[in-house]
Image: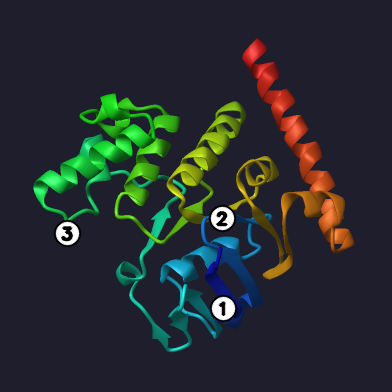
Amino acid sequence: MSDLLLLDKISLAYDTPEGVLPVVSNLSLTLRQGHIGCLLGSSGCGKTTILRAIAGFEPLRSGGIRLGERLISSPGDAIEPQDRQVGMMFQDYALFPHLDVAGNVGFGLRRYDKAARKERVHEMLVLVGLADAAHRYPHELSGGQQQRVALARALAPEPRLLLLDEPFSNLDVDTRERLAFELRDILKKTGHTALLVTHNQAEAFAIADRIGIMHEGRLVQWDTPYALHNAPATPFVSDFIKREVLMAQRARAYQRGLAAE
């Protein structure tokens, strides 16, 4: 199995009135074809900026991004987002309220003829378990169902790489965990390569084959879930894992307490 995604010493920064603000510094990683990767860290660590750079929405200050053998981004030279064969599922799902479920899923299939588009939409809705909801509208769906529609829409154009930005942040704890496992099952079934970002360790460990711990714009460790738990590379990684486990336990207990009231 070959590498599909390569980030080679990439750096990202924003221009501000006060000067250049570094966001990501000299970050490298590889993600193999068919694997699911995750960038895990607290808010402001740079993980979403990396996702946006891969999608083509943020320019690199240094380094390069490759998808397979193709260089898709380097300083001053970048392939347009729509030409990268990269799909993106946004944090708020970004569904079109005036389109039904079938219309949302088929929105990116302009290159298909009418019959092929209809067939592809149906195939995607069967995949995410919403075949009976094709003519419902987003406001008629639960948060979990909206998330499934957004996933189907992102997968419909057959991207080589799927990017997911905090895909479960709008859902309650129990729904998050259930859908995290379902998402992994769907991606493994289709063979898609995916990279998601989250601040929730439970989601990361439920989904990912490789997890990167981010801290202040740097990738501290990129490893398997087992290695992160059993062989943390630094004291920061060790403390981060332990702290996140405790916070997840408290959040679960809190949610169950509310449900019992």
Q: How far apart are the alpha carbons under marks 3 and 1? A: 35 Å
Query: Which kind of residue does numbered mark 1 sit on?
Result: Ala
**Which residue sits at x=69%, y=45%?**
201
Q: Does label 2 or label 1 sit earlier along the sequence?
A: 1
Query: Which kind of residue does numbered mark 3 sit on?
Result: Arg
On the rendered image, what quadrant is the N terminus found in? bottom right
CB of mark 3 within 8 Å of CB of mark 2? no
Residue 156, image x, y percentages: 31, 49
**Helix, strand or loop for disc 1:** strand
Residue 162, image x, y percentages: 44, 56
CB of mark 3 within 8 Å of CB of mark 1? no
Q: Nearer the viewer, mark 2 or mark 1?
A: 2
Q: How far apart are the alpha carbons under marks 2 and 1? A: 28 Å
Q: Nearer the viewer, mark 3 or mark 2?
A: 2
Specify the label residue 13 is tagged with: 1
Specify the label residue 111 is tagged with: 3
Residue positioned most to the top: 261
**Which residue sits at x=54%, y=61%?**
48
